[in-house]
Image (cartoon, rainbow, N blue to C red):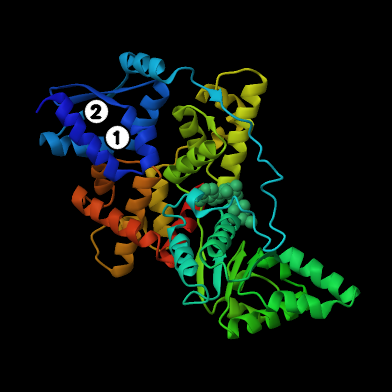
Amino acid sequence: MDLNRLWQNTQEEFKIAVSEATYQGILAQTRLVSLKNNIATIGCSNTYFCELIEKRYYSLIKEVIDRQTKKNNSLVFVVDFQEKKEKKEKLGPLFKIKKTLSFDKKNNGFSSETGLLPYYSLDTFVVGPANNFAHAAALGIIKNPGGAYNPFFVWGGVGMGKTHLIQAIGNAITEQHPQLKILYIAAETFTNELVSALQNKTITKFKKKYRTCDVLLVDDIQFIAGKEYSQEEFFHTFNNLYLSGRQIILTSDRKPEEIQPLEDRLISRFMGGLTVDIQPPDFEMRLAILKQKSKERNISVPEETLSFLAETIKSNARELEGALSQLVNKAQSSNQEITPDYARTLFGFKKKQLRRISSRSVLAKTANYFSFKTKDLCGKSRKAELVIARHIAMYLLRKDLSLPLVKIGELLGGKDHTTVIYAIGKVEKQFSVNQNLRHQITTIRKSLR
Ligand code: ADP
Ligand code: MG
């Protein structure tokens, strides 16, 4: 098979294996320079990409090339100047700003009728393993408000996209069901309005406002914890709407049962419908979010810098967005070219986050979480709980450490690499629908940092 054909087939497989953003931004920028004596030399456009691709995608590229050539190959990554030169000519200057960053506040203000911000849309909401369950439920609600998912309770840490998601649901319902009355409110505003209504003796008006809508979206409901009067009023509002089949959507920074102090009757109401969580985004989602934000703001930042940010800032979408703005603004004002090195000077303090986690600690922490010994985790027993723990360890070794499949198999008691692929696939599939599993993985991940 000639090199071009082989690489074309390989690229087709990459498209299936990774997200669109990763493919376009990273893997599509590579070239098979040569394949001799079972050594495949892969050309990348610069040293940063060489390191990134080797670290993250070595085993994927190897698997695909091995399958195509039916041989066991090794990979070498080189900076491919020829490729770089061609691309520079095609792309022109590396960095340009086409428009100012800020939104036009006048056109994007809250709607006084619904409290919604029109620019929050599902079209700009990046979906990945961390939030696809919440996204799927959102689509169901938009189709049939007041249907099966009522109330819909979304929880997750700050900056995970809860407000974006529920605002987008509100906007989509406004569009698709114009006859419905929609109301979005932050729980804090609900409380403040209630206090003024009591002071001004306008409580009847207040009650009417909240009890006559068809879709009520309350953001950050944890705010009513410890506020007796707000809880009382919200309980009656909730019942009123719920019993007449209206849709209620709530967000919170924690699960219903962890909102304290909160009356039990409210906790059980909140849990009576569909409760989903949004988890921190993985690398591919972070990269996709950065691309989405660059696109929305009409700025172009080189791929390698976006991947650097996605690698470095792992917490949440809000921080990613903040870092992107900061980077672009600073580069603009100091007339600097945006490169990973420049980004590193700004976010150098984040380097600590890049600390490498060892495979030994992944095994130890996973075993510890399930109260097993590492020796048993890496052993042969087929006890159900051990098998699950083993699958999770394989998943983490692959996702967080990018270890080759063969190496993972070796670490976990000499399993074949196809067993490892099967296990990781199984966890991946379950990750978006099984909250218990997601919780287990998140807890183990936290203990590794
Ligand atoms: P939360 O309400 O969970 O604290 P927000 O909804 O305010 O988070 O999100 C913070 C910022 O990150 C917003 O600008 C939002 O548009 C963006 N964001 C969060 N998640 C996503 C996502 N999945 N796709 C695109 N943008 C996102
Ligand atoms: Mg919010």
| Residue that mark 2 sits on | 75
- Residue type, label 1: Tyr
Residue 416 in sight from this viewpoint = no
In the depicted structure, whether residue 77 falls above or below residue 121: above
Residue 312 location (% of width, % of height): 52, 36
Front residue of 85/63: it is: 85
Q: Determine contact: label 1, label 2, CB under 8 Å.
A: yes
Q: Residue at x 62, y 61 (%)?
A: 253
Front residue of 441/64: it is: 64
| Image mark for residue 58 | 1
Residue 81 location (% of width, % of height): 34, 14
Choose top left, top right, bottom left or bottom right for residue 436: bottom left
C-alpha distance separating marks 1 and 2: 7 Å
Residue 258 in sight from this viewpoint = yes
Front residue of 196/413: it is: 196
Residue 126 location (% of width, % of height): 47, 49
Choose top left, top right, bottom left or bottom right for residue 105: top right
- Residue type, label 2: Leu
The quarter of the image holding the N terminus is top left
Under circle 2, the secondary element is strand
In the depicted structure, whether residue 299 falls above or below residue 366: above
Q: Residue at x 59, y 73 (%)?
A: 248
Q: Is residue 325 left or right of residue 378?
A: right
Q: Is residue 92 left or right of residue 118?
A: left
Under circle 1, the secondary element is helix
Q: Is residue 244 left or right of residue 187?
A: left
